Amino acid sequence: MKAEKEFLVKEVFEHLGKSDYVYLADFSRVTVAAISTLRKNLRGNSAECHVVKNSVLKLALKENGCEDLDGKCFEGHTAIVVGGSDPAGVAKVLFKFSKDNEEKMGVKGGALSKHPLAVSEIKALSELPSLEVLRAQVLALFNTPAQQLVRVLNAVPQGVVNVLQAKVDKI
């Protein structure tokens, strides 16, 4: 392999190491200004978008241990989206961008924890609540049994008070 190609593979491999996911997108019909807007939106989630050659990407994915992606992912112009700790949030940004730009940029596929993802699975990820909302929901689930226990324990004395109040009201 030529030194230039080895350098490119190493660079893409380093990008892939920034997160445990990678999304592949087709950007062939998107303007430079729109890509700049996408990159700005992705920075909000600490993610990055890089345009790569398909042959270099295949080699970098192979080195990374993720070579089971569908062959259709490597057709046409390819951009990779990596980085950040919230794959669902990044997927939301990608699909919102695609919708806002009249479907000019399409997600081709991706991988999460080195397992291939179809477009439908990435779409399902994008529809999940944000990480903060999920954490709040889990904390609420932990708190619910304690709240119910307090209500049960409070019901007995409250019942006695209600009976006594009814007796006083009768007199």
Image: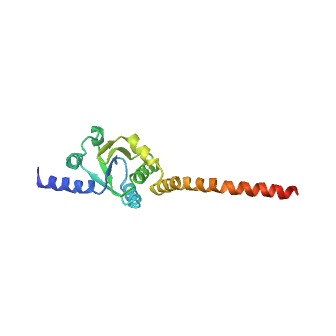
Q: Residue at x 78, y 57 (%)?
A: 164
Q: Nearer the viewer, residue 90 or 137?
A: 137
Q: Nearer the viewer, residue 37 or 122?
A: 122
In the rendered view, does 52 fall on the left or right side of 167?
left
Q: Residue furthest top?
A: 71
Q: Nearer the viewer, residue 103 or 43?
A: 43
Q: Residue at x 63, y 53 (%)?
A: 152
Q: Give the x, y percent position of residue 67.
A: 24, 43
Q: Quadrant of residue 106?
A: top left
Q: Quadrant of residue 157?
A: bottom right
In the rendered view, does 67 fall on the left or right side of 90?
left
Q: Residue at x 26, y 40 (%)?
A: 68
Q: Give the x, y percent position of residue 47.
A: 35, 58
Q: How many marks?
A: 0
Q: Residue at x 30, y 44 (%)?
A: 115
Q: Quadrant of the C terminus?
A: bottom right
